[in-house]
Image (spheres, grey):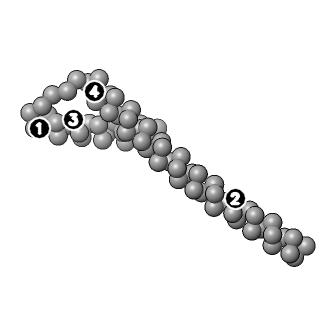
Amino acid sequence: MQRTKHAQEVASRFKELVEKSGDLLSEDHYDELSLLIEAAIDTALVEQLEKVAGKLEKLSHAMRNDAEFFG
């Protein structure tokens, strides 16, 4: 999935920055970071889908009202 790959790339970039500064973290920490990033992406996607669903619901009501008016 694209989200997983993107999350892994972000975690990998963070790892580069940490190691460049001379610090070290275990691979488990980077794996956990990747999961947290992916969860954040999923949350953002769900929020956007909810907004789209709300807009579609309003449009549906407006179309019903128009159909009743012209029907």
Q: Which residue is mark 3?
A: 15
Circles 3, 1 touching at the beta carbon (< 8 Å): no
Mark 1 residue type: Lys
Is residue 70 something that shows in the picture? yes
Q: Nearer the viewer, mark 2 or mark 1?
A: 2
Q: Nearer the viewer, mark 3 or mark 2?
A: 2
Give the image quarter of residue 59.
bottom right
Q: Is residue 52 above or below residue 24?
A: below
Whole-angstrom CA distance, mark 3 to mark 1, is 8 Å
Q: Counting other residues with Cα less than 10 Å from the Cα at mark 2, is it few (<14), some (14-19), or many (20 or more)?
A: few
Q: Nearer the viewer, mark 4 or mark 3?
A: 4
Tag of residue 47: none
Disc 4, SS: helix
Whole-angstrom CA distance, mark 4 to mark 1, is 17 Å
Mark 3 residue type: Lys
Residue 67, given in percent of the width and then of the height, sits at: 84, 70
Whole-angstrom CA distance, mark 2 to mark 4, is 42 Å
Q: Which residue is mark 4?
A: 29
Q: Which quadrant holds the C terminus?
A: bottom right
Mark 4 residue type: His
Circles 4, 1 touching at the beta carbon (< 8 Å): no
At x 59% / y 57%, what residue is drawn?
A: 52
Q: Which residue is mark 1?
A: 20
Whole-angstrom CA distance, mark 2 to mark 1, is 50 Å
Disc 3, SS: helix
Q: Which residue is mark 2?
A: 57
